Image (cartoon, grey):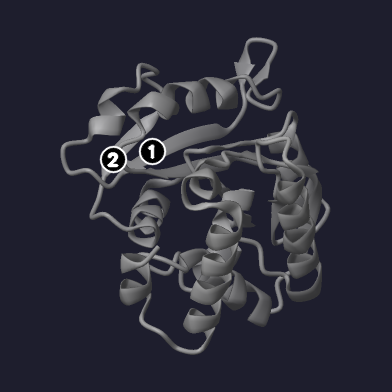
Amino acid sequence: MTISIIIPVLHEQERIGGLVEDLKGQGAWVKGQEKQGVEIIVVDGDPQGSTIAAITDHEVVGITSEKGRGIQLAAGVEVATGSIILILHADTLLPDGGLQAVTRAVANGTDWGAFRLGIDSPELAYRMIEWFVDLRCKLFALPYGDQALFMTSSALASCGGIPPLPLMEDVELARRLRQSGYAFTLLPQRVATSARRWQKDGILRRTLHNWWLLLRYLAGADPKKLAQTY
């Protein structure tokens, strides 16, 4: 069972090295001297490939595409060879043993899933956000991309692949997978997602804005216009 980890990036030169190193340190990557079936694909939305240029590990697959998270992810899927696709944001780290947890879940019958959200800050307000995200996932099977969404390549293909949207591609993908009847699992481990966007915009303002964007999208708003206000 192989995993293709697809990372959409835009000007993430300072973060990408640490993320690749963290992934390489995952226990599922190395077994003795034998490499497991894991590939890392970085899709750069900068036509100059500025983030790719900062990667020193030659085993990482680096490609460029038109800017837009859904568009970049779709480009990554085109070159992926794994039987499992895992979407990872550049500011999110998997929990220890995360790759093993994914392969174990799929082996037990899961078609798609995600980790619980974990925000990398000790502030109590972030624990409230995490609780609400847990509830959303349990009630509606609606994880976001910053929870390291994963799915079998066959389930993804049958749902039409990654929606090439500049924003809300994760929501649309989750809706398609859920509506197709594929088995969903919310893994118990939490990712470690940077709090940088909440810290930049303010916790309450960013949270309310995210909810407003979701409601507008579900009501039929154009993702391109939503992306301009993200």
The answer to whether mark 2 and mark 1 are in CB contact below 8 A is: yes
The amino acid sitting under disc 2 is Ile
The amino acid sitting under disc 1 is Val
The residue under the point 67% across, 69% down is 142
Judging by the rendered image, the residue that carries numbered circle 2 is 63
| Image position, residue 15 (x, y; %) | 43, 28
> Which residue is at the front of the view, 71 or 4?
71
The residue most toward the top is 33
The residue under the point 67% across, 36% down is 121
Instruction: Indicate the secondary structure of the residue bearing disc 1.
Output: strand
Q: Is residue 147 above or below residue 215?
A: above
Q: Residues within 10 Å of mark 1 (few under 14, many from 20)?
A: many
Q: Is residue 111 above or below residue 121?
A: below
Q: Which mark is residue 42?
A: 1
Instruction: Indicate the secondary structure of the residue bearing disc 2.
Output: strand
> Which residue is at the front of the view, 202 or 214?
202
- Dot 2 or dot 1, earlier in sequence: 1
Q: Is residue 158 left or right of residue 11?
A: right
| Image position, residue 137 (x, y; %) | 74, 66
Q: How many marks?
A: 2
> Which residue is at the front of the view, 14 or 206?
206
Q: CA distance from mark 2 to mark 1?
A: 6 Å
| Image position, residue 220 (x, y; %) | 45, 88
The residue under the point 65% across, 82% down is 179
The residue most toward the bottom is 219
